[in-house]
């Protein structure tokens, strides 16, 4: 707000990353009850994200903040991304089925069971696997419920 | 116009005078109020901006919040440069100077304890990030903190479904390897820096979308370092940064000892891992105790 201050501390107030500052001034520091009582826990870093929307989207974008584009509830961009992801899941599924089809005529002991469609996906250490299977599970659940 | 008193920090009484040009969060000069055996660093702020109701609304405005946070931080910086200072949390407000004195009353003991622990020491922040995956973004994971460089061209199109699967798997393997390596390095760096610090705190990894930083934050730690050890500490961080290929190490500071006030005032037992042991550096958390 004023000219840069002298001393070894001068830099952090002016140029420090906003996240570094907020993490300290909102969440650390001495807590002592004054006359005005505001629960700063209400504006912890995670919820600040939501307030970004209310603030200025352009400003946030300048800062490189565009997380809401990933949030289906908030953006049509996210809808497109969702579609792209679904598309990708389907492509994987097709690829797996292709493999299965090639495997069946090749050998007698080939994976002929229905579940084998997932076999190629289960073969590696695949950290994304759980997530990708999640939608299937949900669908199964819906079918059971429905 | 009614004014309130905004309190930035608590310092020992009788310290050096504040810089005359120092301005508070709303542009007014910063002064001091003595009470309870300590000195509070305060400035007047307009009630229409800082009283309970407008404050609650203002805190929801990121631009306003940023100005307030930087203003607060700037005063705390200036005060900490003069001697040991206990930074208060943002938006600590009293109606008048009498209120400030009331607030300070009765806490002399825990403030004195904290001054003793923190005097002559600074907080340094060290963060480690993975370098963003150049092939990132194309993956179906979507949730990775890929930074701002989305929308890059996709890698070469797979000829068949099988190729496609293979590409995906190789990509995942390399990503998995790199996060394992990042984790190992984060622990190594932290274990080493712990030996150079009196106390440490692990914070939660920062949200890339707020910090705007590229890559995934795998270590976010604060170290309390004696001022005469700051040089060697920073030098060691620099060396470790050079050794950690594929990772980015960031040093910030010196900060007033925000992360250590809870411990130093006795509001929190021990000097363990603090609030942020969750997330990407769990093992570092287990070994993060203070060395005192």
Image (cartoon, grey):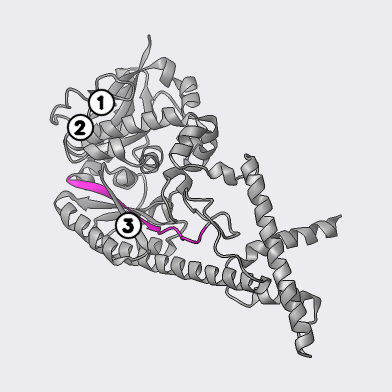
How many angstroms separate mark 1 from mark 3 (CA)? 30 Å
In the displayed image of the protein, which residue is found farthest to the bottom?
Answer: A108
Q: Position of residue B281 (x, y in %)?
A: 42, 61
- Please state, as top left, top right, bottom left or bottom right, where the C terminus of chain B lies in the image: bottom left
Same chain check for tags 3 and 2 = no
Checking the image for residue B275, the label placed there is: none
Chain letter belonging to callout 2: A
How many angstroms separate mark 1 from mark 2 (CA)? 8 Å
Q: Residue at x 75, y 58 (%)?
A: A138
Checking the image for residue A5, the label placed there is: 2
Residue that carries the numbered disc 1 in the rendered image: A2
Q: Is residue B101 left or right of residue B2?
A: left
Q: Is residue A104 above or below residue B47?
A: below
The residue lying toward the viewer, choosing from B96 and B225, is B225
The residue lying toward the viewer, choosing from B246 and A37, is B246
Callout 2: SS: loop
- For the record, the magenta segment spans B120-136
Chain letter belonging to callout 3: B
Residue A135 occupies quadrant: bottom right
Q: Residue at x 69, y 57 (%)?
A: A87
């Amino acid at each position: 707000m004023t000219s840069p201050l002298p001393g070894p501390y001068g830099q952090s107030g002016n140029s420090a990353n906003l996240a570094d500052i907020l993490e300290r001034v909102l969440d650390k520091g001495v807590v002592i009850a004054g006359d005005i009582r505001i629960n700063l826990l209400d504006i912890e870093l995670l919820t600040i994200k939501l307030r970004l929307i209310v603030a200025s989207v352009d400003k946030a974008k300048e800062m490189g903040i565009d997380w809401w584009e990933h949030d289906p509830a908030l953006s049509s961009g996210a809808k497109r991304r969702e579609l792209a992801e679904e598309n990708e899941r389907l492509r994987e599924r097709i690829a797996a089925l292709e493999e299965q089809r090639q495997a069946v005529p090749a050998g007698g002991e080939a994976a002929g069971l229905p579940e084998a469609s997932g076999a190629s996906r289960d073969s590696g250490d695949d950290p994304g696997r759980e997530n990708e299977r999640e939608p299937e599970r949900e669908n199964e659940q819906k079918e059971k419920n429905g | 116009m009614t004014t309130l008193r905004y309190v930035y920090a608590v310092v020992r009484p009788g310290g050096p005078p504040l810089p005359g040009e120092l301005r508070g969060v709303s542009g007014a000069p910063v002064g001091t109020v003595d009470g309870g055996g300590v000195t509070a660093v305060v400035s007047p702020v307009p009630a229409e901006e800082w009283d309970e109701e407008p404050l609650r609304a203002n805190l929801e405005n990121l631009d306003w919040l940023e100005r307030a946070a930087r203003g607060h931080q700037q005063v705390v910086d200036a005060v900490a440069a003069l001697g040991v200072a206990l930074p208060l949390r943002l938006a600590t407000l009293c109606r008048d100077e009498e209120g400030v004195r009331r607030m300070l009353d009765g806490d002399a003991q825990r403030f004195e304890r904290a001054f003793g622990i923190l005097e002559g020491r600074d907080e340094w922040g060290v963060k480690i990030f993975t370098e963003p995956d150049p092939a990132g973004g194309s993956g179906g994971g979507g949730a990775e903190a890929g930074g701002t460089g989305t929308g890059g061209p996709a890698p070469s199109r797979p000829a068949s479904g099988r190729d496609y699967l293979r590409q995906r798997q190789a990509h995942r393997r390399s990503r998995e390897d790199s996060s394992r390596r990042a984790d190992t390095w984060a622990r190594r760096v932290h274990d080493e820096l712990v030996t150079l610090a009196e106390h440490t705190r692990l914070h939660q990894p920062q949200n890339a979308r707020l910090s705007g930083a590229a890559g995934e934050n795998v270590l976010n730690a604060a170290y309390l370092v004696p001022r005469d050890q700051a040089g060697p500490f920073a030098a060691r961080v620099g060396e470790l940064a050079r050794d950690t290929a594929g990772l980015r190490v960031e040093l910030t500071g010196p900060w007033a000892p925000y992360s250590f006030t809870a411990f130093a005032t006795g509001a929190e037992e021990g000097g363990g891992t603090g609030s942020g042991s969750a997330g990407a550096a769990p093992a570092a958390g287990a070994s993060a105790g203070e060395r005192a």
